[in-house]
Amino acid sequence: MTRESRKFFPDTLIHTYQNTCKGILLFYSREDRLVYFTIFATIARKYPDITVVGLCLMFDHIHKALKALRKESLSGLEQQTARSFSKAVNQDAGRSGRLFRSPFGSALKVGLKKAKTGLNYLYNNPVEKKLTRDVEKSRWNFLPYAISDHPFSERLNLHTASYYMKAAVAEVKTCFRKNLWLNYARLRRMFAKLNEAEQEQLTDFIISLFNPIDYNALVAYYGPIGKGRKHVWHRCGNGWRRELVCSPEFTCSYRTMVQAMNANTGSEYDIVMDWSPQPDTAYVEMIEYVRTTIGHDNVKAVLGWSPEEKSKLFRQLSRATSAAPNQIQKFLQL
């Protein structure tokens, strides 16, 4: 699809998607996803005419649902995000070359029925790939963050938090205030000093703070939202606490939306994606195997191995996991 032929109507929902070159994997770790997420969120803030309605990060591709007033803004957001993430990944891996196919794909969703069908499809990607049973249980489609700032962790209390947790939160806030995305070095340094529960809290905090998704716009496709969803500030000790508040109408329509998404996964006939029948749970298995059996916390370190070492690992993964040969090839970027 060329830029000249791309269909676009101002302020109309458009489903954009990006495939990787040769179908290689994009995301091996939480850090990979948070780098992409904060890059996208930071760049999206530079385009006030764009409304982000959906985002889903899969292992080897990305889906977005956007509304823009100008076609140039849409292209600018997609291209700058892809370019910045590719540069970050290449620097981290010590390599060069393109990461995404160009240009990105898109499908216009004119009318409420097509919009809802497209949104159902986008948010159901983790369900279709067996990564979760329910659409609202996936961290990386970001749907749980519509009604909670900490859906996968205990509420963060900075008054009782550890020194390293307080320092990490302060650093994240500073980056957000300065419109800086979180790079690999910063994320690894912060997470290395936290225990597992704190890492979950920090992940939720980063996502909630940077989150560019307009959940009011999303839920409005499925019902009235009243006063919608907003953040309010409450005095807490010597400081202030940011708390999420959802109107009863918003909560009711959110539940209706989740019910509809779980009942109807949606479909997309006007996009060109690399489809595979194998579940993505195989990637989870391979990542865990490299971490526990091979002993590499940084799973992407295996990408720098020699062809002989990769061939040996290929055979090991084939025996120890449910991954199909094509999935192991994508995992090892062969």
Image (tube, rainbow, N blue to C red):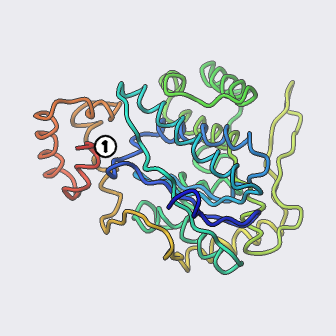
**Mark 1, secondary structure of its residue:** helix
Left or right of residue 232, residue 305 in this image = left
Q: Quadrant of the C terminus?
A: top left
- Residue displayed at 70% across by 49% down: 73
- Residue at position x 31%, y 43% from top? 288
Q: Which amino acid lies under the numbered mark 1 shown in the image of this protein?
A: Glu
Note whether 231 is above or below 141 in the view shown: above
Nearest the camera: 55 or 5?
Answer: 5
Nearer to me, 125 or 169: 125
In percent of the image, x 60 and y 20: which residue is there?
A: 164
**334 displayed left or right of 107:** left
Q: Quadrant of residue 160?
A: top right
Between residues 194 and 263, which one lies in front from this camera angle?
263
Compared to residue 287, the image places residue 126 above or below, namely below
Q: Position of residue 137 (x, y in %)?
A: 54, 60
Residue 240 x, y percent position in the rendering: 85, 32
Above or below, comparing residue 105 to residue 40 in the picture: below
Which residue is at the front of the view, 244 or 122?
122
| Residue carrying label 1 | 288
Dot 1, how many residues are within 10 Å of its Cα: few (below 14), some (14-19), or many (20+)?
A: some
- Residue 191 as seen in the image, left or right of residue 304: right
Q: How many marks?
A: 1
Q: Quadrant of residue 332?
A: top left
Give the image location of residue 175, x and y in percent: 68, 26
Q: Residue 25 appears at what percent x and percent y?
A: 36, 47
Judge from the rendering whether residue 331 lies leftward or rightward of residue 157; answer left or right: left
Residue found farthest to the front: 4
